[in-house]
Amino acid sequence: MTISTLAVIVFFMFHIINHTENDVEKMNLGKIARALEELDNCDDMPEFSDEEYNTIDEIREIRNYWCHQYYLDFIYIENHYNREIVFQKVAKKLHYDEYRTYDLFKKTEEMRLIIMRKYR
């Protein structure tokens, strides 16, 4: 969803400077974001603001938590009652992040559309 929108933006910008699709496919989201920012700032006329880079970083943080960390927050708690309490906190975070990712999706989609209109 938001990650694919970001990938489209990054691929498009990499394509402009003759990178291949495979270069981007092999990169993790953090490296893609850094490469995008580096490329964007290379001419001292960036397309994206600091706020937009913060949006991209927020997407990375959410993705990393749900891909790598969430289950570690509760899976090793031996006491069933305590594990359930922590699990419920994680479940609330998931609900909260659902709304955050939708808002971030809207922001990144707007960014993508601006770039696509500009470079078509």
Image (tube, rainbow, N blue to C red):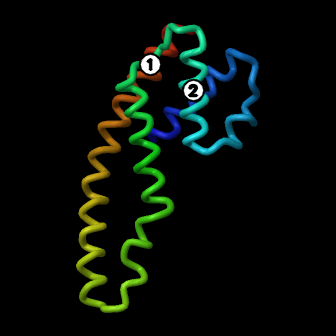
Q: Is residue 13 above or below residue 67?
A: above
* Residue 29 visible to an observer of this rendering: yes
Quadrant where the image shows the N terminus: top left
Q: Is residue 113 left or right of residue 86?
A: right
Helix, strand or loop for disc 2:
helix
Q: Is residue 3 left or right of residue 92?
A: right
- Residue 55: percent from the left, percent from the top? 38, 33
Local packing at callout 2 (Cα closer than 10 Å; few below 14, some 14-19, many 20+) is many
Mark 2: which amino acid?
Leu
Q: Is residue 76 above or below residue 5?
A: below
* Residue 120 visible to an observer of this rendering: no
Name the disc covering residue 48, or none: 1
Asked if the residue at tag 1 contacts the one at tag 2, i.e. Cβ–Cβ closer than 8 Å, the answer is: yes
Earlier along the polypeptide chain: callout 2 or callout 1?
2
Numbered label tally: 2
Residue at the (44%, 35%) spot, across then down: 56
- Residue 46: percent from the left, percent from the top? 49, 13
Q: Residue furthest bottom?
A: 79
